[in-house]
Image: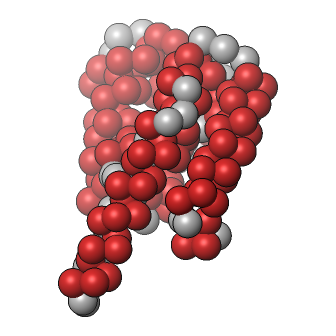
């Protein structure tokens, strides 16, 4: 299908002629799935994302500006795939103890976890929150700034100050060697 034909179909969909939607979906499912797969690396996630993308197209077709439908569709696919990755990362715990072979190793790991938790607890509340958002919930500087309703520079400065305090505390507790 050429550019003019899919542009025509997309405009018909925008006008409320939903009978063209299955044709657009048939034309672009594989391409949208490939975008999602390239980003997520998972075929099942790519299939789920593809369904979500086409539902979004139906919901948001009125927001389409009537220009390049393919670019608009593929941008939705990229954004949805990236959102999926972010969501997946935030659901995983950043720090999880590994399986150790000796009781001594397990004991030392629990002790380190306790020391890290204690050091984090000693940070001022704002610094602690930003460290947790950044390194345990995998939020970007921009996302943290939006969450805290402050400038990105403020987040960066706060992280820097927090890490200076953490580094000093880690030295005091003997964790510095293990973390570096």
Residue at the limit of the structure toward the front, as seen here: 172
Q: Position of residue 67 (x, y in %)?
A: 66, 23
Q: Nearer the viewer, residue 19 or 141?
A: 141
**Residue in the image at 34% along x and 71% along y:** 109
Q: Position of residue 173 (x, y in %)?
A: 53, 59
| Model colouring | secondary structure
Q: Nearer the viewer, residue 137 or 52?
A: 137
Q: Position of residue 33 (x, y in %)?
A: 40, 54
Q: Quadrant of residue 90?
A: top left
Up-down relation of residue 169 to residue 180 (above or below) = above
**Residue in the image at 60% along x and 12% along y:** 149
Q: Is residue 123 visible?
A: yes
Q: Position of residue 34 (x, y in %)?
A: 46, 59
**Residue in the image at 65% along x and 38% along y:** 162
Q: Nearer the viewer, residue 92 or 170?
A: 170
Q: Nearer the viewer, residue 57 or 171?
A: 171
């Amino acid at each position: 299908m050429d550019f003019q034909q899919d542009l025509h179909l997309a405009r018909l969909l925008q006008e409320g002629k939903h009978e063209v939607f299955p044709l657009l979906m048939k034309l672009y499912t594989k391409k949208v799935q490939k975008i999602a797969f390239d980003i997520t690396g998972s075929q099942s996630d790519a299939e789920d994302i593809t369904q979500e993308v086409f539902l979004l197209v139906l919901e948001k077709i009125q927001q389409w500006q009537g220009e390049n439908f393919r670019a608009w569709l593929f941008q939705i696919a990229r954004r949805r795939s990236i959102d999926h990755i972010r969501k997946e990362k935030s659901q995983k715990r950043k720090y999880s103890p590994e399986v150790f072979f000796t009781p001594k190793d397990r004991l030392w790991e629990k002790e380190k976890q306790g020391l890290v938790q204690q050091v984090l607890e000693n940070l001022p509340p704002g610094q602690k929150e930003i460290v947790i958002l950044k390194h345990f919930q995998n939020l970007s500087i921009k996302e943290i700034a939006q969450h805290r309703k402050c400038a990105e520079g403020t987040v960066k400065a706060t992280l820097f100050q927090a890490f200076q305090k953490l580094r000093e505390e880690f030295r005091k507790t003997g964790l510095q060697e293990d973390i570096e």
